[in-house]
Amino acid sequence: MNNIYVFGSKGQDGQLLTHLLKEKYKNSRLILFNSQYVEVFLNSNVIKKIYLNNQNEYLLSVSSLIEKYKPKLIFYLAAVHISSQEKEINIDFNRSAFVNYFLPFHILNQCIIYKLKPKFLFASSSLIFSDSDVTPQYETLERKPSCTYSKQKVLTENYLKTLLNFDMPIFVVILYNHESHLRSEKFFTKKVISSCYAVVSDQLNRPAKPIRLFNPDSLIDMGYANEYVKGMINLINNATPGDYIFATKKPIKVRDFVDVVMNYYSLSEDIFAYIETKPRFKVPLIGENLKVYKTIGWRPNLYREKLAVQLCNDYKNKFKI
């Protein structure tokens, strides 16, 4: 029986991935970790649930479960990061270091101890190139992170490269913005859509003052999270280990995304305020997706205006996975 581990199972990607895995691997055992508990699923039924009260209990649970349910596939999607509108001072550095670096180290160390070689997929971020002066970015480009989150991602990537000495099959997916209805309200796309929806619905939580957004001319390379997660499953099953960029290479301006959403809701009133005019990065974060296309034929179908409309439809219809 295949044992499949998912870390970060309650995040956007984790929820989408779990849904797909339950459909694709009906006879497999799924071990789902989130910040509060771990669930063991068999035939879509929970057979064990372990509550995690602190980091030490988390690590002990990882060790005991890996020994008992030897993993064949591990998806590491857990991350602690902040949105573009938040400040570094808000980071819980102990928690971010634990999740972004120490936990994947512990997981793979346990695999080495028990002489296991599961396929391990690690979700990295386009922000590892946030201080780069090259665009579009590609897999072998020098990492130039500028924030705590991206620096921790690079630190973990460097550690993963050392596991080549153990013949460990490691997949690093460098994910550019990928959106869905499961995003939290603090993220740009969800903030824009939910604010417009609140206005047309005349809800009590409609914005009392303009919503703050960043530079209207900023370019964002973003796609549909559902497509990205499907690509990850395809990759880990059919590709050779290595680094792979998941991106559209077709960015949209912030103001253009906002315009599409406002047109969708037939809004003309100004409910957004652009508070910055300077570029967010030295060069736009745009991903070169040629490698993953040549490897597994993955290329996104939803981007720019089509993506904005899809996200609006999902939110309006309360789309469920």
Image (cartoon, helix red, strand yellow):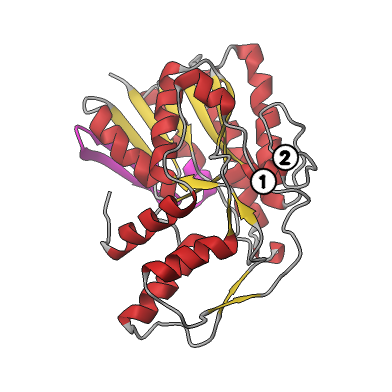
Sort mark 1 into few (<14), some (14-19) or many (20+) by Cα contacts within 10 Å. many
User: Which residue is disc 2 drawn over?
Assistant: 135
Q: Left or right: where does residue 198 sit relative to residue 144?
A: left
Q: Quote the CA–CA distance across marks 2 and 1.
A: 7 Å
User: Can I make out residue 189 in this image?
Assistant: yes
Q: Left or right: where does residue 200 sit relative to residue 154?
A: left
Amino acid on which disc 1 is placed: Leu
Residue 271 vertical position relative to residue 12 in the rendered view, above or below: below
Say which residue appears at 48% left-offset and 43% top-offset. 58
Instruction: Name the residue nearer the viewer: 38 or 119.
Output: 119
Q: Position of residue 124 (x, y in %)?
A: 59, 38
- Counting the numbered discs, the total is 2
Amino acid on which disc 2 is placed: Thr
Q: Position of residue 178 (x, y in %)?
A: 49, 47
Q: Secondary structure at mark 2?
A: loop
Q: Position of residue 122 (x, y in %)?
A: 54, 33
Q: Quadrant of the N terminus?
A: top left
| 46 inside magenta stretch | yes
The disc label shown at residue 134, or none: none
Q: Magenta segment, which residues? A: 33-58
| 39 inside magenta stretch | yes
Q: Left or right: where does residue 157 sit relative to residue 119?
A: right
Instruction: Name the residue nearer the viewer: 121 or 312.
Output: 312
User: Which residue is disc 1 drawn over?
Assistant: 285
Residue 311 vertical position relative to residue 231 in the rendered view, above or below: below
Q: Secondary structure at mark 1?
A: loop
Instruction: Name the residue nearer the viewer: 307 or 150.
Output: 307
Q: Are marks 2 and 1 in contact (CB under 8 Å)?
A: yes
Say which residue appears at 58% left-offset and 39% top-offset. 249
